[in-house]
Amino acid sequence: MIYKEYGKTGKMVSAVGFGGMRFDLSKSNEENAELLIYASSKGINYFDTAPTYCENRSEDIYGIAFKNMPNNFYVSTKGMPTRFDTKEKAKDAVKRSLEKLGVDKIHFYHIWCLRKMEHYELAMKPRGQYEGLLECKEEGLIEHIVFSSHQPGHEIKKILDEGKMEGVLLGVNILNFPYRWDGVVSAYNSGYGVVAMNPLAGGAIPKYEKELSFIGSNGETPTEAALRFTIASKQITVTLNGFSTKDQIDMACRIADEATTFNDKDLERIQKRLGENMNAVCTGCGYCWDCPKEIPVPAYMQFYNEKQMFGKSDEKMIKDIKREHEWGLLVGRKASAKDCIRCGKCEEACTQHLPIIERLKEIDKWEQKNSKL
């Protein structure tokens, strides 16, 4: 395992981190906790979660695992400024997480899911979330205040330049790096910890390995290449992986042991093959699930990725949506794209700032034409 210093904190963290968003919820908390214990035995010492991950079970799973692990790990969790908008709420959130996690302190606490500067400003207002976190830090409940961002690079740089944070968690992978790398480089050059989420583009890379075969080299799969890209990068401190099997842990740890960085020639070759559409791919975070009409927006956006990423024609998408209705992402849907009332709630929640309403309109046309086939 590779270990890197997290910014200027002095903490040496594993280049592979365990992201607690992809547990198999058909299994018990105790069964899922075994994965964390196994990851720890493989040298992973950075464990990231959040209160609402996995139907509010993730922190509980971590708490079970931590009781059965050597005390040489670092724990990271989060709180949204839109939900914890006073220092009192922020402190209560930290204490609830501590209780669930079963630890005395949280090493890295994220101001979570900043999608625009207004969210950061809300966190920083007098008697707001940041003040509450500072008090928690003074009381020894947390060690480092960091943030999770889905903003463009120049906004990330603006937040870092204010000097209130010690690190950043952001979505970067081998598909979108041409459009996110400025934020990564800015953070790294300024001495901050940089944690990469969605290294496999929300599962899109494993799903489309045939189409993305150009990513790999020397016989490696696109999935292996994508993990190597972030794990071996000197600019990225930790690459979070949402593990659901031991085999996945083994693969990530093997890549960390063997990882070699992509050289400029590799990156130039890949960048030439990537269209600008790669920056507009849904990562599957699921924040847009809360639709007032119960439209399965994340499922629709994952399906739309096939057009966005691989240039599928409308004719192909019309045919393929039948597959999703009967066998795939859209089985059991309570509402369809045509039911969108354009309230904008999904777009407000979208971490990628995607034009979801326009995409639903397009999908509605595909569904209507498919019904006539």
Image: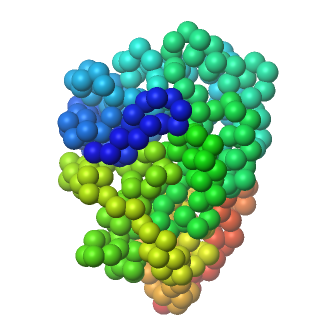
Which residue corresponds to the image point at 49% horizontal and 71% vertical from the top-left? 264
Instruction: Give coordinates of residue 52: x percent, y percent.
Output: 48, 36
190 or 19, which is in the foreground?
190
11 or 342, which is in the foreground?
11
Q: How was the colour assigned to the protein in this rendering?
A: rainbow
Instruction: Give coordinates of residue 359: x percent, y percent.
Output: 64, 71
**Residue extending furthest top?**
139
Instruction: Give coordinates of residue 234: x percent, y percent.
Output: 46, 52
Q: Is residue 363 left or right of residue 21?
A: right
Which residue corresponds to the image point at 39% horizontal and 80% vertical from the top-left? 214
> Does residue 255 sit above or below 266 in this rendering?
above
Which residue corresponds to the image point at 68% horizontal and 24% vertical from the top-left? 130
Quarter of the figure that contains the N terminus: top left
206 or 224, which is in the foreground?
224
Instruction: Give coordinates of residue 26: x percent, y percent.
Output: 27, 44
Which residue corresponds to the image point at 35% horizontal and 41% vertical from the top-left? 3
> Does residue 285 sit above or below 142 in this rendering?
below
135 or 94, which is in the foreground?
135
Residue 48 in which image quadrant:
top left
> Does residue 311 sit above or below 25 in this rendering?
below
Q: Is residue 330 left or right of residue 290?
A: left
Q: Is residue 298 left or right of residue 364?
A: left
Residue 206 in which image quadrant:
bottom left
Residue 87 seen anywhere in this rendered image of the structure = yes
Residue 248 seen anywhere in this rendered image of the structure = no
> Does residue 68 sit above or below 284 in this rendering?
above
Number of disc labels: 0
